[in-house]
Amino acid sequence: MSSTEPDAGLPGVPLRSEGQPGSRPVLLDAAVTTRCRRRVHLEHDPEAGRTNGATPVDDAGGAVLPEPDPGVEMRVADAAEHRTAVSARFAELLGASYRRVPDGARGERVTATLALVADGSVAAIGAAELPPGDGRRGHAELLVRAEAGGWYPLIIVRHRVSDPGTGALTSPLARPHPSSAAPDPDRKVRAVARDVLRLAHLHRMLAAAGLGAASGAAWGGVVGLDADCVVWTDLAAAPGNEAGRSPLDTYDRRFADRLAVATAARAGAPALAEPSRITECRRCPWWPVCEAELRRVDDVSLVVRGEDALRLRGRGITTVRALAALDPRRGLPEPAEAAADDTGLATDLREAVALARAWRSDVPLVRRVVRPDVPRGAVEVDVDMESLGEDGAYLWGVLLTGADVGLPHGYRGFATWDPVPTRDEARSFAAFWTWLTDVRARAARRGLSFRAYCYNEQAENRWLRGSVERFAGEPGIPPAAEVEAFIASDAWVDLFPAVSESFLCPHGKGLKRVAPSAGFGWRDPEAGGENSMRWYRRAVGMDGDEPDPTMRERLLVYNEDDVRATHALRTWMTSDAVLAVPHLDDLPGEAGRPADDATAGPVEPIELPSAAACAAPRRTG
């Protein structure tokens, strides 16, 4: 959820709600700077979500949140385990100069941190809790003492913070200090907004407490998933994620805004952030609350998001119904007030209107083209990969169809059931690649064309490349150039762009949103990426339990259904059945007329054809 991000100077709101005895000051951590404004409001509104099965949140001023997502909980737990491991490594490497703040209540940790700051023999403080103030609270995984006095913040994260390349400023873990940093010949910075904004938050907290570095650059350090170095950033000089602003500039602007939003919500003042659907909504725990409100008012952001929704509202188009009633040939109404940044919609108006009409008619797909185009081959393989975050790819599933090349048709899964990351990934990936290469070679020897398909290639390509990089030299692992040649070839087809080019999708373009229109259904009613992570942890006994073979079978069924869904979707897209999907010019308007027909009769329900889901015996290996 989001609303407009003001460019400057929101009016100040007292940090304490006047006339409310016992009210506490609003204290925000750095996470608010990367959250939407409406979520910040809801997290600090004492009345938000109380009737939505929510649970209380400590120190949120009486605010409540819906039950956490299991996948999010797992990532949080994994991140905590990573921080613990890296912190133990710092303790080992830094010896007597390192001290860790003991666990305890926040106030006790602040007191212990300040005591260590005053100890001249301490050069590095682990698990440092900084004094709250100015609306901020926060902690650093490590503080390192600056030469001229004061401290630099360092954080530990469980994602990659560099990529192959050159230029990142790094220091060894044994010398976690900017004075030991040098340009790295093998790494370039992978900019992650939430990391630099959290470092900026800690920098401001240190300065407010009189603990900031006395001179020099505004350094902040981060240790990532690989945990083999510290990557340093000058928060006052490096480019931020907003044009022309440093990380500190971006942070100051965002934090002032979020603090105003949260304080108004806590005080019961008029909301400074109203709901509007954005990309972040897909994973936000507050989405059910906001969705209900958006549906109640028929908000236009349900079908046209981001800046386009704001521009439509500025022209008086606030509801899906109003958008659906527009005649695209006449264009948009003039804005109520001239705005320099209102240059019209990024989305084609004809398509925006069609999306609104499809939404109101509950039509899941609308054709943008007369007939979709998907490259086909005489021999075809559908591919789907399953991974556990950044830890590794544990399963490559394939579905072989088309002309006979002397190998069994159907599904096959190449899996490792050793907890990732594991060297056994090399074996399973090598088996997958060897099989795929064999199919391609057999097709070529028979003079048959070959195509392999996936849905949204980003994940598959990431682990194709990552596997050959991590396991180079292992038996069966191909050279990186061989994998790159395959990715770049016309034999590797990503179905997602074909769907995007062929259809408007009012309810999203994910495979599980689109494939049902092709008649496909998943056998497992709980099939989904987040659930698969939970199943995997149980399948391999990752949380200390015995490995559960039923979860392994469940993952294989899930993966098989994913490749069969891709197969069903692409074969449907290249059949005459797809022509039953309404074309965008054929959708009736609000008056019951097609966009180009002023004499048409009333709106009739639009029904899409269905087909039997694919379900054939599968093979594993």
Image (tube, rainbow, N blue to C red):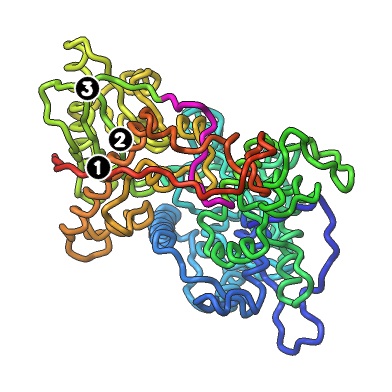
Q: Quadrant of residue 17?
A: bottom right
In-front residue for pair 97/305? 305
**CA distance separating discs 3 and 1:** 25 Å
Q: Amino acid at mark 2?
A: His
Give the quarter of the figure containing the C terminus. top left
Q: Which residue is mark 3?
A: 437
Q: Find out whether residue 370 is within the magenta segment.
A: yes
Residue shown at 57% from the left, 58% from the top:
143
Mark number displayed over residue 462: none
Q: Amino acid at mark 1?
A: Cys
Point out residue 76 in the picture as x, y percentages from the top left corner: 44, 61
Give the side of residue 526 with respect to residue 410, left or right.
right
Query: According to the image, label 1 marks what residue?
Result: 614
Mark 1 → mark 2, Cα distance in angstroms: 9 Å
Residue 415 in magenta?
no
**Residue assigned mark 2:** 567
Q: For mark 3, does the 10 Å Cα neighbourhood hold few (<14), some (14 to 19), or many (20 or more) residues?
A: few
How far across and down, in percent of the image, does residue 588 sit?
Answer: 61, 43
Earlier in the chain: of badge 1 and badge 2, it is 2
Residue range (magenta):
360-373
Taking depth in this image into account, of 64 and 543 the one nearest to the observer is 64
- Amino acid carrying label 3: it is Thr
Is residue 12 rendered to the left or right of residue 329?
right
What residue do we see at 70% from left, 47% from top?
325
Q: Are marks 3 and 1 in contact (CB under 8 Å)?
A: no
Q: Is residue 68 above or below residue 433?
A: below
Q: Give the percent coordinates (x, y) of residue 106.
A: 56, 75
Task: Assign the N terminus to one quadrant of the image.
Answer: bottom right
Name the residue: 41% across, 34% down. 578
Q: CA distance from mark 2 to mark 3?
A: 20 Å
| Mark toward the start of the polypeptide (2 vs 3) | 3
| Label 1: which secondary element | loop
